[in-house]
Image (tube, rainbow, N blue to C red):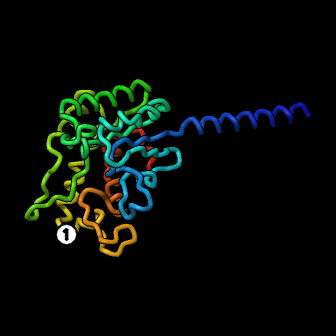
Amino acid sequence: MKTNFLKIFAAVTLAVLFSFTFVQKKTKLYIIGDSTAANKEEKAYPETGWGMALQAYFKTDVTVDNRALNGRSTKSFRAEKRWDPILAQLAPGDYVFIEFGHNDEKVDKPTVGVSLADFKINLVNYVKETRSKKAFPVLLTPISRRSFKNGVLIDSHGDYPRITRQVADSLNVPLIDMLAKTESLLTRLGDEPSIKLFNHVDSGNVNYPKGKKDDTHLSPEGAKQVAGLVVKGIKELKLNLAKSLK
């Protein structure tokens, strides 16, 4: 009787320990950034952020926590206290994917836009604070707008992507060059075929009665493809996250 009890006790103990170990292996992947990545309300559909499509690429041991928000920059995301709760709950081994630029470049809006020098300082702070929690920062350049001129894709982000690359290089931070990846995708598709990746809707749509031609924000298909490029970057960098991809 005593032997059986000990066997049962040992089995239960092992089960609890394995369960605890499984829970401990859960990893959070936070996304901070702007509207190109953000979760969207139903009233914005079919506009879709690439962050909404990322979870589908991962197994259950990684949880994507998308905190990106419309209209935010490295400056306003912090000023509005959006960063504070993320930093407070960051655990060792978590990841923070940092993608800004679309709104930082709007220097005519003082609560949002920032100079290149301040953009650099802001990125450095996000990186250092993430590392202070023994979590892993990953920098992403902003995705390309669909800005073709005479069939040629034109860059609309100025030097902000260059600063992101510079910070990644100087602080040895993994970088996914989303501008380069999305420019390659759009160029390969061409002007008209690339429309399907963006929030273009005909008039009569329930959310856009007058229609919409938006060459910044993504369609569901665009979000899926751009999230796929993020995943490609994860694989290229050989991040530990790659082990959790489907």
171 left or right, relative to 64: left
Residue drawn at the location 41% of the way across and 55% of the way down? 40
| Closer-to-camera residue (125/181) | 125
Picture residue at 15% right of the left edge, 40% below the top: 159
Q: Give the quadrant of residue 217.
A: bottom left
Indicate the position of residue 199 as horizontal and vertical percent values: 30, 63
Q: Residue furthest bottom?
A: 204
Q: Amino acid at mark 1?
A: Glu
Res. 72 image quadrant = top left
Residue at 17 percent across and 60 percent down: it is 187
Residue 9 in the image, given as x and y percentages of width and height: 80, 33
Please indicate whether residue 117 sits to the left or right of residue 45 in the image. Answer: left
The percent coordinates of residue 109 (x first, y second) are 23, 42
Q: Name the side, left or right, on which 73 lies relative to 21.
A: left
Task: Check disc 1 and report the residue beneath it.
Answer: 192
Residue sitting at the far top? 132
Up-down relation of residue 170 to residue 198 (above or below): above
Q: Residues within 10 Å of mark 1 (few under 14, many from 20)?
A: few
Residue 236 seen in the figure: yes
Q: Nearer the viewer, residue 207 or 148?
A: 207
Q: Is residue 197 above or below residue 92?
A: below
Residue at 53 percent across and 39 percent down: it is: 26
Q: Position of residue 38 (x, y in %)?
A: 38, 50
Q: Image height check: is 14 above or below 245?
A: above
